[in-house]
Amino acid sequence: MSAQKTLLLTGASRGIGHATVKRFSAEGWRVLTCSRQPFDARCPWPGGEENHIQIDLGDPQSTIDAIETIRGKIDGRLDALVNNAGISPKTEEGGRLNTLETDLRTWGKVFHVNFFAPIVLARGLKDELSAARGAVVNVTSIAGTKVHPFAGAAYATSKAALKALTREMAHDFGPMGVRVNAIAPGEIETSILSPGTEKIVETLPLRRLGQPSEVADVIFFLCSPESSYVTGTEIEVNAGQHV
């Protein structure tokens, strides 16, 4: 019997992250989750507190310090790292923060969570990923390629940078046997949907919202042997919103 595979997932508590926990757990993987909050006993996945790492991805030192904690839990091998955590601050009224209104500290926080944390984690765990000939999946966004009516400028540019980082990481990690890809979700039915999303949905070729489980399926594909010759690419998961 083959050894149980291990996934490290950021942003696990809701939406796409929650669906990803369920998808990998159903396939028999051990899932390590990361979030700013301590473990919540109400979370319904196996392993519980033992598989949770408290980490503030907006704080560079916290992210760096967490590497040793993660190492202590994975026994020299990490089969997959999914960088799903992302923040998209809004105005006080809940509106879009554009390039003219976004405070520099807000830019910095968004980039720390959405862009710097993925490379800090991957670089810090490169030996463990290499030992497993593992995979990294960076979750980008439709907002990384075009101005979006709801996603702020800091969020959008951080996701565009993450797409470019995926290419660079694929080049650098490839010789270690590690594949690095990205997925770019569009309008997915989660708790963070903005009012007015239905107007976007009317213009999509498939004319419907995506389900978190549909995104999780693509993430799982990119971490599985079925995608063993795929690296450095970004898969659009958006009902054709990019066409």
Image (cartoon, grey):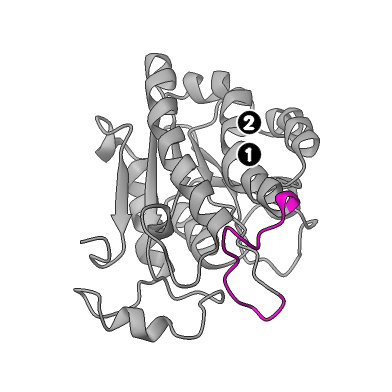
Q: Quadrant of the N terminus?
A: top left
Count of marks, rendered view: 2
Residue displayed at 51% across by 77% down: 193
Labelled pair 2, 1 in contact (Cβ < 8 Å): yes
Q: Position of residue 177 (x, y in %)?
A: 39, 19
Q: Residues under labels 2 and 1: Cα distance?
A: 5 Å
Q: Secondary structure at mark 2?
A: helix
Quadrant position of the C terminus in the picture: bottom left
Between 204 and 52, the one nearer to me in the picture: 204
Instruction: Indicate the amino acid at tag 1.
Output: Ala
Q: Is residue 111 left or right of residue 3?
A: right
Q: Amino acid at mark 2?
A: Val
- Residue 89 is inside the magenta segment: no
Identify whether 169 is placed above or below 83. Answer: above
Magenta part of the protein: which range? 92-105
**Residue at the spot x=74%, y=31% of the render?**
64
Residue that mark 2 sits on: 120
Residue, disc 1: 117
Between 202 and 183, which is closer to the camera in this rendering?
202
* Prevailing secondary structure of the magenta residues: loop
